[in-house]
Image (cartoon, rainbow, N blue to C red):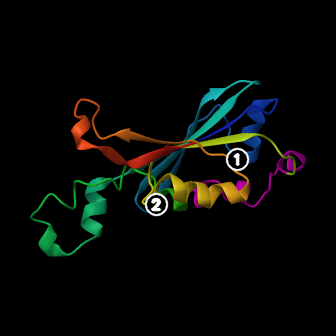
């Protein structure tokens, strides 16, 4: 699972102060389902991107859920839970970015109180209600969204579209 947060506020690297994560370091946190990593694939004065990557252990996840009679099948092991944004991502965001979500910055409170441009991207999100649901959820809050669904496999268009969307 991946969430990226990008800003073009200058200096853009101040995003590190807002998230309380130094852009020059890799940050790793233990979570119940595995590990959460925060890193900055892009960190310049013009543009800065923080990435939250969840590393979910699918084997441990399959052993923790479901009845014992499913253990003889592949069903507990073959699913999207370790890869698509879900409640696991919500919990990781709450744990890793708790001070940012509360609008606090230990070193730059004036920056935390300032409105800055942010772009969030979730490349794989299961959205059962489709684009209309995503728009109804986010647009009344003032967010503009781009919603894209890719085919399951571009080589086999007859398989149809994926159940997952990329939301920016």
Q: Is residue 79 visible?
A: yes
Q: Nearer the viewer, residue 168 or 14?
A: 168
Q: Which residues are magenta?
A: 93-112
- Which one is in front in this view, the residue at disc 2 or the one at disc 1? 2
Which secondary structure type mostly characterizes the magenta part of the structure? helix
Task: Reply yes or no: does residue 100 show up in magenta.
Answer: yes
Residue at position x 45%, y 56% from top? 127
Where is residue 148? Give x, y as percent: 48, 41
Name the residue that disc number 1 marks.
19
Residue at position x 46%, y 55% from top? 130
Where is residue 76? Give x, y as percent: 22, 61
Report the label total: 2
Residue 20 higher or lower than 75, as above or below:
above
Residue 35 higher or lower than 75, as above or below:
above
Name the residue that disc number 2 marks.
129
Where is residue 98? Give x, y as percent: 67, 59
Residue at position x 67%, y 54% from top? 139
Residue 54 higher or lower than 47, as above or below:
below
Left or right: where does residue 108 sit relative to residue 142?
right
Where is residue 150? Give x, y as percent: 39, 39
Check disc 2: other Cα within 10 Å, few if <14, some if 14-19, many if 20+. Answer: few
Identify the image quadrant of residue 104: bottom right
Quadrant in which the C terminus appears? top right
Residue 103 higher or lower than 148, as above or below:
below
Circles 2 and 1: CB distance less than 8 Å? no
Residue at position x 45%, y 46% from top? 165
Identify the image quadrant of residue 24: top right
Check disc 1: other Cα within 10 Å, few if <14, some if 14-19, many if 20+. Answer: many
State the residue lying farthest toward the right: 110
Identify the image quadrant of residue 10: top right
């Amino acid at each position: 699972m991946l969430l990226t947060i990008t800003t073009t506020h200058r200096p853009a690297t101040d995003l590190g102060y807002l998230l309380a994560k130094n852009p020059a370091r890799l940050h790793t946190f233990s979570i119940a389902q595995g590990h959460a990593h925060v890193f900055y694939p892009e960190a310049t004065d013009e543009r800065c991107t923080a990435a939250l990557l969840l590393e979910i252990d699918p084997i441990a996840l399959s052993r923790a859920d479901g009845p014992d009679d499913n253990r003889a099948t592949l069903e507990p092991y073959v699913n999207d839970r370790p890869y698509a944004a879900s409640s696991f991502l919500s919990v990781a965001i709450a744990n890793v970015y708790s001070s940012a979500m509360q609008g606090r910055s230990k070193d730059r409170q004036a920056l935390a109180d300032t409105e800055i441009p942010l772009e969030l991207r979730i490349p794989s999100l299961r959205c059962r209600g489709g684009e209309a649901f995503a728009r109804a959820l986010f647009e009344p809050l003032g967010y503009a969204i781009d919603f894209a669904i890719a085919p399951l496999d571009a080589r086999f268009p007859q398989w149809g579209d994926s159940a997952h969307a990329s939301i920016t």
